Structure formats: structure tokens, C-alpha cells
Image (cartoon, coloured by chain):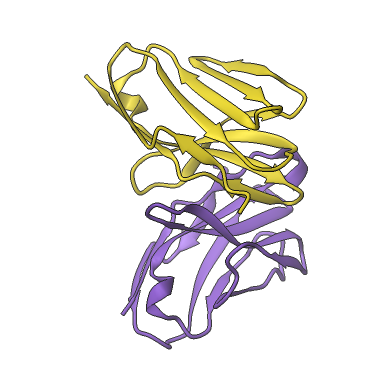
Chain colours: A purple, B yellow
């Protein structure tokens, strides 16, 4: 089954404790991206990757890191989480940006205390 | 920001009625897409319309695009309770996707 898998789905952590949210897709997609969704603000793009070893900042990259060492995986790293990073995070993938359609994971709800 | 804006923010209709939601955006685009999100779940792609297209249909969905007004509309005909969800437009600019804030649709059985 074609899918984008995120882990963990729910996480409560404390300020400053490094964490990684994993994202994996089984569709051989070149394009992967991370979004955060906050009430009233819609989805905002954090980082995206056009292919292995190619990553770029989105609109809200501050406080986040990503890596793309393998085509299927695109982890989101919060080196020192802060309460303003409490949000619902989505990973998405697509064949290439040119085709447009994105496939989304089920989301990871992160709370930073 | 190049973010799209959906209108209305919330819409409540009776089952069987049509639902129309609108999206406005700010810059030239390659394509515009509509997505659906059930509460707390991931977004699901509904339909894509390219910048050189004016109208597109898919089942009970009809999308229009007016690039001169930088706007799009999504029409859901003969709505069902299962259509209750949030609907987002998304524009692709270069290699980035910009999502609106969404329209929350409630279909009352």
C-alpha cells in the first residue's frame, strides 16, 4: 500500500530536549517536504527536498533541521525544541514538484512544555 | 506571504445541497490544487487544475480557475454527511507549495 509514514504520532517533550520526527515513503518519490499546521495559520512549509542530498528552506525553517540521505526518508530534527514549536506536523511526498500532487502522512502532534 | 485564502472560513449546509468554497492567491502559479482534511488526519489530494485550464471536473467536484483574478472555486454537488471536512487550496510556485487556511465544511444529515 502506497503510504507516507510518520513517527511518532504523538509526543510530549520538554524545552531543549532534542527530538527527531521520522518520515518514510514507499512510493519512490523524489520530492518530500515538511509542514506545520497551526490554528488560523493553515499549513506552512518548513523544509523541502527535491531529491537525495538536496534540501531547501521553506517559509518557517527556524529551529528545524532536515536531512535526505536516502530517497525514502526525510527526518525532521528539532535540536532544541521550544514551546512555540508545539504544533501538528505533516510530512508529504510527490513524484516531482512538477506533477503537483502531494501524498501526506497522518501527522505528528508535538507538545513542547 | 504567497498563502492562499479560502472563503468562507466555515460553511454549514444540509445533505443534498451544493457547497461552494473559494480560494484567492497572490502570485502567478503553475497549478492550483484542492485538498481535503478530515479532523486531525492527513490531507488528501482531490483535484489539480493547471494554470492554462479554466475548469475541471472529477465526480461530484467542479473546480474553476481564473488566473486574471487569481482565484479558484471548488463546488461539491449533492453533498453527503461524509463530505464534512476542511478543504484547502494549494498553489505551487516554483518548487514550493503554499496552502490556504481552509474552509471547514459541515454537512448536516
Residue A92 against residue A69 in the figure, above or below: above
Q: Residue furthest left?
A: B109
Image-based side of B12 in relation to B3, left or right: left
Residue B55 drawn above or below residue A72: above
The residue lying at 32 percent from left, 11 percent from top is: B16
Residue B57 placement (x, y as % from top left): 59, 15
| Quadrant in the picture for residue B10 | top left
For the point 61% across and 62% down, which residue is it?
A59
Percent x, y for residue A96? 75, 46
Reply above or below: B57 against A103.
above
Figure quadrant of residue A81: bottom left
Q: Relative to residue B90, is residue A92 depicted above or below? A: below
Q: Quadrant of the N terminus of chain B?
A: bottom right
Residue at 45%, 54% (x, y): give it. Answer: A41
Residue A24 visible (yes or no): yes
Q: What is the x, y in percent for residue B17? A: 33, 12
Q: Nearer the viewer, residue A54 or A1?
A: A54
Amino acid at each position: 500500500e502506497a503510504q507516507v509514514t510518520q513517527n511518532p504520532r504523538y509526543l510530549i517533550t520538554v524545552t531543549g530536549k532534542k527530538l527527531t520526527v521520522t518520515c518514510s515513503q514507499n512510493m519512490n518519490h523524489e520530492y518530500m517536504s515538511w509542514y506545520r499546521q497551526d490554528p488560523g495559520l493553515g499549513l506552512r512549509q518548513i523544509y523541502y527536498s527535491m531529491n537525495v542530498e538536496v534540501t531547501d528552506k521553506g517559509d518557517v525553517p527556524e529551529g528545524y533541521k532536515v536531512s535526505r540521505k536516502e530517497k525514502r526518508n526525510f527526518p525532521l530534527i528539532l535540536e532544541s525544541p521550544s514551546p512555540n514549536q508545539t504544533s501538528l506536523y505533516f510530512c508529504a511526498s510527490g513524484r516531482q514538484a512538477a506533477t503537483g500532487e502531494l501524498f501526506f502522512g497522518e501527522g505528528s502532534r508535538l507538545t513542547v512544555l | 506571504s504567497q498563502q492562499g485564502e479560502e472563503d468562507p472560513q466555515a460553511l454549514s449546509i444540509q445533505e443534498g445541497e451544493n457547497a461552494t468554497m473559494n480560494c484567492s492567491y497572490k502570485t502567478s502559479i503553475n497549478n492550483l490544487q484542492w485538498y481535503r482534511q478530515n479532523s486531525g488526519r492527513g490531507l488528501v489530494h482531490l483535484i489539480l487544475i493547471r494554470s492554462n485550464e479554466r475548469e475541471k471536473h472529477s465526480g461530484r467536484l467542479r473546480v474553476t480557475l481564473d488566473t486574471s483574478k487569481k482565484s479558484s472555486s471548488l463546488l461539491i454537488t449533492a453533498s453527503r454527511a461524509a463530505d464534512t471536512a476542511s478543504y484547502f487550496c494549494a498553489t505551487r510556485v516554483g518548487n514550493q507549495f503554499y496552502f490556504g487556511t481552509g474552509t471547514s465544511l459541515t454537512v448536516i444529515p
